[in-house]
Amino acid sequence: MTATLPKAAARPRRRSATLITGCVLAGAVGLLALVALFWLPYATDDTSGGRLTAPGGDHLLGTDKLGRDLLTQVMNGAVIAVQAGLGSVLIAAALGVALGLLAAFAQGWLDDTLSAVLDLLIAFPTLLLAMLIVAARSGSLGSAIIAIGIAQSAVVARLVRILAKRVLAQDYITASRTSGTSWPRIVAGHVLPNIWPTLVVNLALQFGLAVLAEAGLSYLGLGAPPPNASWGRMLLEAQATFTTAPAGALAPGILLVVLVIGVNLVADGLRDTLDPTTRGRQA
C-alpha cells in the first residue's frame, strides 16, 4: 500500500506540469502577439534598416534582405499565427459539431452517406485541400483561415459523431425521450456536456495543426500577402541568406516550434485532466 501512494500522488503533479509547461510556452507566443497588436518596433513595410544588418543596436534581431526589422516581422507573424489558429478552430468547431450531431442522429442510408463523406474528406490531406480552396478564392489570410477550418471540420465532425452516438445509446437518453424531453434539450443537457472534454482536447490539437498549415500555405505563397510577415513566408525569404543571416530563419522557426509544442502540451494536459476514461486508466 505504501509503495503505491507516492506514484498515485505523482500523477496529478505530472499532469499539472505538462499543462503548466504548455500554457507557459503557448502563452509566451500569445503575449508576443498581444503586444504586437498595440506596438511594433517599426512599420511592417519599413525598409530603412539596411540590408541584412546584424542583430543588435536598433535592430535586436537584425534586418532581412529588404532592410525590414526582423523583430517586427516576427511579432507580426505571431499575430498571424494566433489568428490563423483561433479562426480555423472556430470554423472547424462550428461546422464539425453541426455535421457531427447531424450524422449522430442520422439513420440508415443518410448515416452511411455522411460517414463516407467524412471519411473521404479526412483521407484527403488537409494542406492539399486548403491549397485547393485558397487557389479557388485568392491568396490571403482570410482565405487560408477559411480553407484550413473547412479542411479540419471533417475530423471534428467524425469525432463528434462517434462521441454523440455513444451518448445517445445510453439508457438515460431513452428514459429522457420516454418522458417527453425534446431532442434539442437532450443535445444541450446530455450530449454536449458529455462530449466537450474530449472535443476541447481535439480542438487544441487542431489549433497547432492549423498554425502549421498556415505556415505551409504562406511558404508556398498562398497565405497572407506582403507586407504581412507570416512565419512561413519569412522562412521562404530567409532560405537564400541563411548562411549569412541565420536569424531570419531561426527566429520564426523557433517560435513556430515553441507554439506548436506548447499547444500540444496543453492538449495533453487537458486530456489527462478532463477525460474521465484517461484518469480511470491511469489510476
Image: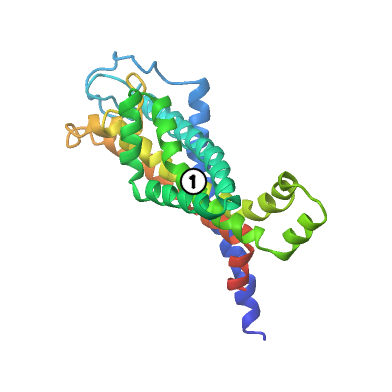
The picture quadrant where one finds residue 66 is: top left
For the residue marked with disc 1, what is the amino acid? Leu
Q: Is residue 113 visible?
A: yes
Which of the two residues, 74 or 54, is positioned nearer the viewer here?
A: 74
| Coloration mode | rainbow
Residue at image x 55%, y 57%? Answer: 162
Question: Image quadrant of residue 62?
Answer: top left
* Residue drawn 29% across the image and 17% down it: 49
Report the front residue among 15 and 196.
196
Question: Percent x, y for residue 27?
Answer: 53, 41
Q: Is any atom of residue 56 visible in this view?
A: no
**Residue 269 in the image: x percent, y percent?**
56, 56
Above-or-below relation of 22 to 149: below
Question: How many numbered marks does the figure carry?
Answer: 1
Which SS class for mark 1? helix
* Residue on which the image places disc 1: 25
**Looking at the image, which residue sits at the far bottom?**
1
Q: Is residue 267 above or below residue 91?
A: below
Q: Is residue 213 left or right of residue 244?
A: right
**Does residue 12 appear to the left or right of 84 in the view shown?**
right
Residue at left 39%, top 17%?
42
Residue 172 appears at what percent x and percent y? 75, 62
Graded by Cα atoms within 10 Å as few (under 14), some (14 to 19) or many (20 or more), the crowding at tag 1 reads many
Residue at image location 48% in from the left, 25% down from the top: 36
Q: Residue lying farthest right?
A: 179
For the C terminus, give its image quadrant: bottom right
